[in-house]
Amino acid sequence: MRHQSVWAPAEDRPAFPTLQQDLEVDVAVVGGGLVGMTTALLAQSAGIGTVALIEAGRLGRGTTEKTTGKVTSQHGLTYAQLIDRHGPEAARMYADANQAGMELVAALTRDCRIDCDLTRAPSLAYTRDPARRRELEEEVDAARSLGLPATLTETSALPFDIEAAVRFDHQLHLHPGRYAAGLAAALLRTGTGVFENTRVSEIDEQRDGTVLIRTPQATVRAGAAVVATLLPINTIGGYFAKTRPTRSFGLAARLRHPAPQEMALSVDSPGRSTRPWADRGPRGLVVVGGGHETGTGQDTRHLFEELEQWTRTTFDVEEIEYRWSGQDYTTPDQVPYIGRSPMSDRILVATGFRKWGLSNGSAAALILTDLLAGRDNAWLPVFDATRIGDAKAVAKLVKDNLKVGADLAGGHLARLLPHHSHHLEPGQGALIDVDGDPVGAYRDPDGTLHAVTPTCTHMGCRLAWNPAETSWDCACHGSRFDPDGRILNGPAVEPLPTVDTDGD
């Protein structure tokens, strides 16, 4: 079994240089995932001016390649809740934006001639619990009132009976890695300035009305900047305090018999999401589930095991070939933040997609492009990135940030037992004591000890060891680091300091 995403981009995708010299552009896009690439491509095509796209690693190698690859306006049981909480007008904006985001993916796949296994298929949100049937009926009514292609069904291609399902027809699924590679190739053809392996450390709006973007080797001055880094880096807009980081797990399996060709999501607990995997023909299946908040300090390997066990007991599995995990952020009112950052007219953001980034993120690119071009956008009010939210959202923010305050005070130390480095077995990580100071240590399978300062470089929260993914994770705002301190997820922009343990 390969411990990597099944959606890795094609190896023949374009490669781009590191930014080595100062640059002046009209628009700088920071973050080379789906949102950043799509926004850069649309902005360049709209003739807004010169565009630069800056990515810390390789294009499409972050959250974009770790999704389910579903592109759908069906986001579980969403629309009845949206209407109840935000009203029908706001719910319609959300629905229209995600339908448009989905169709944008289809249009770009066609127009840019991207070979990414794009397929139209129905999407189901189902329950096996008779007590929840009315909830699904209400969701169908809500979705249909917003113009969405929703119907109620009691049948599916799943190998078990269901009580009922909300069905959306004409949805999409694709290979997100190949889609990202296709967007990269399209950017190359348009002449957009794209820079990989260039980590942005600071983004500031200047008094002269420009935005200054700093990297280790060079500075970019732009008329406007789009921050598309999953969560805005550093403290931009305060979004680190307005969102919560969550992780989920995925696997790709080859079955002995044909897999269901519809996309399906259980609304019961534990949630399970399935979709076809075209690389293995009719017998390929992708399964995702088992979410938890980042940096729990608990051994989450059992979540991988439970997902695999469910897959094997539900389907006739010949082999599980891949397994991986991904991260996303949720907002307190369940709607992404898209638009101008607070206190800034020239720094735009998109974050908080709640694991529905392929449709929401594509919709975000449409909204951001309109803002860059000085055009109105009909969907902007519901996604307004400067909003505070309703009383329920504010209450959740207070609760979440009280927890963050405890972590800032060093709460993570109580979750891990200190070890002496000599007691770490190969493959084990923990906090150890070195001359009275806590050190984050991991002994790799070869026996080599890797040691870092276990304090997040973002805002100083203590880190927790994640044995399922061999990483140091921050529960405060979701930054993650590998055993040598390199950044896996922001908002941190500085690696962890390494520690000399005097040869173990």
Image: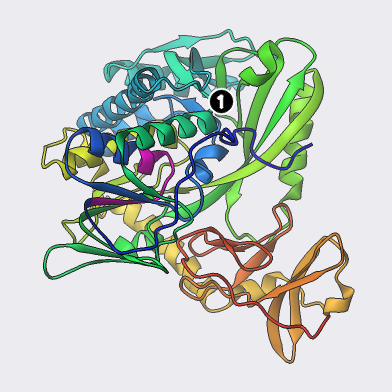
Q: Is residue 412 above or below residue 13?
A: below
Which x, y percent locates residue 4? 68, 41
From the viewer's perspective, tell me whether residue 54 is left or right of residue 290. Answer: left
- Decide if residue 133 is in sight here: yes
Q: Which residue is mark 1?
A: 265
Query: Residue 345 at x, y = what percent?
Result: 16, 56
Q: Residue at image x 65%, y 26%?
A: 286
- Residue 364 appears in view: no
Pick the residue in front: 18 or 37.
18
Residue at image position (42%, 46%) is 32
* Colour scheme of the picture: rainbow
Callout 1 amino acid: Leu
Q: Is residue 28 located in the magenta-colored stretch of the structure?
A: yes
Task: Report if residue 333 lies within the magenta region.
Answer: no
Percent of width and height locating residue 411: 59, 74
Comparing 351 with 65, the one in front is: 65
Residue 307 drawn at (x, y percent): 72, 35
> Relative to residue 176, is residue 390 depicted above or below?
below
Task: Name which quarter of the figure residue 6 lies in.
Answer: top right
Q: Residues within 10 Å of mark 1 (few under 14, many from 20)?
A: many
Which quadrant of the rendered structure holds the N terminus?
top right
Magenta segment range? 27-37
